[in-house]
Amino acid sequence: MIDLAAAFATRTQTYLAAFRRIQSLGYRRIGILLSRNDDVSATSQHTSACFQTVFGSSPIPELLQTNVTTYQDGYRVAGDYLSRNLQPEMIFTNGDDVAAGVAQRYQEAKQPVPPLMGQENQLSSRLLNIPTIDHHFERVGRLAFGLAESQQVQRIAVDSQLISRGWFE
């Protein structure tokens, strides 16, 4: 095995805390939007595993959407949910801008926007007043660059942070 330097965000405790809070608020039909499917993404596998740990089952297949990375993708998925009358009780997204696209589509359809959770603590989550998970990627990037410059073989973990706002407080 080759020792490699790495800076990375830890996610387990934050995902578990988020899903426990979502569950405690009574939500069961959760839309989950991910960038890639479980076959190719450790992050997607991790998200699904944390969901299963808390809810005791896998995410609902028709509410689990992959290939979602942008505002436009969130908008598209929300349109799909609406056209198929899937009615998720809340939507856990892989990005704040994705959540903004979801919100926009529901608003344009004159439908109530389900509670949303984003990730990355972007401006869009602040403007929408939605909870988010901050993986502190800017800090992770600085640390990774520092490791590359120093040529140290070290693994540095940065804890993700659950940020409560709006409906989640």
Image (cartoon, rainbow, N blue to C red):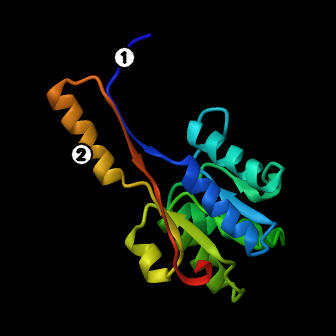
Question: Residue at horizontal 69%, vertical 84%?
Answer: 109
Q: Amino acid at mark 1?
A: Asp
Residue sitting at x 74%, y 71%: 24
- Which marked residue is nearer to the observer: mark 2 or mark 1? 1
Q: Position of residue 80 (x, y in %)?
A: 73, 65
Residue shown at 58% from the left, 36% from the top: 42
Residue placed most toward the observer, 60 or 12: 12
In the picture, residue 77 is in which quadrant? bottom right
**Which of the two discs, 2 and 1, labels the residue nearer the N terminus?**
1
For the N terminus, the quadrant is top left
> Which label belongs to residue 3?
1
Q: Quadrant of residue 32?
A: bottom right
The answer to whether residue 61 of the structure is visible from this angle is yes
> Is 77 displayed left or right of 35 in the figure?
right
* Secondary structure category for the residue under label 2: helix
Q: Position of residue 152 (x, y in %)?
A: 22, 24
Q: Any mark on residue 142, and which?
A: 2
Q: Position of residue 127 (x, y in %)?
A: 43, 82
Which residue occupies 38% across, 73% down?
123
Quadrant, the C terminus = bottom right
